Amino acid sequence: MNFNCFSNDTRLTETTPAYIPDSLIFDMDGTLWDNVDTYAVSWTRGMKKMGGYDKEVTREDILSQMGNEIGGVMLKVLVPEWTKEEQNRLFHAVIESYQELVPTMKPVIFDGVTEGAGAALAKI
């Protein structure tokens, strides 16, 4: 496999030092572990903090919105009848609820992540 390097129009291959990464950046939430259940609890608690809203946000609700921006699309889908001000207050209540759950959350780490991280650290 070759990649075009636009800086000087040379070709990179798998053995070219510039091709071989020396570090990785992970999008950890959803890539390395499943934290959807914590999100669902955060949304449910956030809505209860708003008062008078007893809807339980389910795992399926969150999964149907994965990839959408929380402060925009998700709010419009989950509570379309709410005013922008109410949605903004809910947004902050959800974030606050999530932060409260951080010390006790138990995300499910995907298979192979622990081993892969150990192998990556061994190369350092």
Image (cartoon, grey):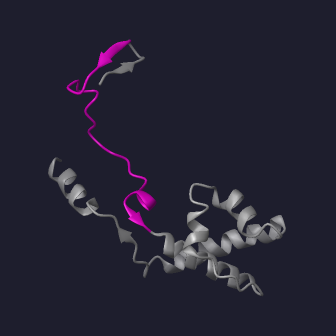
Q: Position of residue 20 (x, y in %)?
A: 25, 33
Q: Is 2 displayed left or right of 92 in the figure?
A: left
* 116 part of magenta stretch: no
Question: Which residue ends up furthest to the left in the rendered image?
Answer: 122
Q: Is 22 displayed left or right of 32 in the figure?
A: left
Q: Position of residue 110 (x, y in %)?
A: 33, 64
In the rendered image, the vertical position of residue 73 relative to residue 103, given as above or below = above
Image point (68%, 68%), residue name: 91
In the rendered image, the vertical position of residue 8 relative to residue 88, given as above or below = above
Q: Nearer the viewer, residue 92 or 112?
A: 112
Image point (61%, 70%), residue name: 61
Quadrant (top left, top right, bottom left, bottom right) of the N terminus: top left
In the rendered image, the vertical position of residue 17 relative to residue 114, given as above or below = above
Q: Position of residue 97 (x, y in %)?
A: 58, 78
Q: Position of residue 3 (x, y in %)?
A: 35, 22
Q: What are the residue bounds of the magenta stretch?
A: 9-34
Quarter of the image holding residue 46?
Answer: bottom right
Image point (82%, 70%), residue name: 82
Q: Is 44 displayed left or right of 123 in the figure?
A: right
